[in-house]
Image: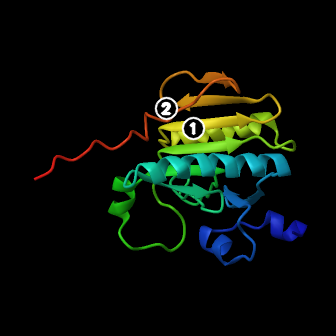
């Protein structure tokens, strides 16, 4: 990307038209390239796999999405596009969107996962987590592959740090569906 392109102000529509935009975010009208690494990408896929396994065992609960899905759900900046590494959105909320599947996700996910990459600047990642919480994301997980930890940020209460030895669940946003009574 040239210096002129970096200083230009972009819209979400501009970003949609760009080839290979799957790793780009839009903040204050400027393109921000998501930092990735082999390890962080592998961990992103593992989160997606585990969530999909849960969803397959509990049909009708939610859908899981990779970082290629951009979210345009920030009231403070309607032009902001963020791409959490993995997200989960409950189906009851997705169904309210109808059939329009163009562009970006207009609602906050029920769970967002960010995986720290070696080139990430720590305070930038923490700022992004705060953006998610301010936008109303109910639950954000921040995975640190180097430290082998996950910090869980439930909206409105202090975060909790978990080590690789802990088992994590997202029951706050992904409860198993209750069986329906037979008629």
Q: Quickly name the residue at label 1.
A: 140
Does 13 sit left or right of 89 as displayed? right
Q: Earlier in the sequence, mark 2 or mark 1?
A: 1
* Whole-percent x, y for residue 62 in the image: 43, 52
Labels 2 & 1 near each other (Cβ < 8 A):
yes
Q: How is the image coloured?
A: rainbow
- Compared to 66, does 100 lie above or below? below
* Whole-percent x, y for residue 28 in the image: 66, 55
Does 5 sit left or right of 178 as displayed? right
Instruction: Give the image quarter of residue 80.
Output: bottom right
- Compared to 158, does 87 lie above or below? below
- Compared to 122, does 38 lie above or below? below
- Compared to 169, does 24 lie above or below? below
Q: Identify the residue at image location x=54%, y=52%.
A: 52
Judging depth in this view, the residue of 23 and 58 nearest the camera is: 58
Judging depth in this view, the residue of 165 and 87 nearest the camera is: 165
Q: Secondary structure at mark 1?
A: strand
Q: Secondary structure at mark 2?
A: loop
Check residue 155 in the rendering and tell me which mark sits there, or answer none. Answer: 2
Label 2 or label 1, whichever lies nearer to me, is: 1
Check residue 28 in the rendering and tell me which mark sits there, or answer none. Answer: none
Q: Identify the residue at image location x=58%, y=24%.
A: 159
Visible residue check, residue 108: no
């Amino acid at each position: 990307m040239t210096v002129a392109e970096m200083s230009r102000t972009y819209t979400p529509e501009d970003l949609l038209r760009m080839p290979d935009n799957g790793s780009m975010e839009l903040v204050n009208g400027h393109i921000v390239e998501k930092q990735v690494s082999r390890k962080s990408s592998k961990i992103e896929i593992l989160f997606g796999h585990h969530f999909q396994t849960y969803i397959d065992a509990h049909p009708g609960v939610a859908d899981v999405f990779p970082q290629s899905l951009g979210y345009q759900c920030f009231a403070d900046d309607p032009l902001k596009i963020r791409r959490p590494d993995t997200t989960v959105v409950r189906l009851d909320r997705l169904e309210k969107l109808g059939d329009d599947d163009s562009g970006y996700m207009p609602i906050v996910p029920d769970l967002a996962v960010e995986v720290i990459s070696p080139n990430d600047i720590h305070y930038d990642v923490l700022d992004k987590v705060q953006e998610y919480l301010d936008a109303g994301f109910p639950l954000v997980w921040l995975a640190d592959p180097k430290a082998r930890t996950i910090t869980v940020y439930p909206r409105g209460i202090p975060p909790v740090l978990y080590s690789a030895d802990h088992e994590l669940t997202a029951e706050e946003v992904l409860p198993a569906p209750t069986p329906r009574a037979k008629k």
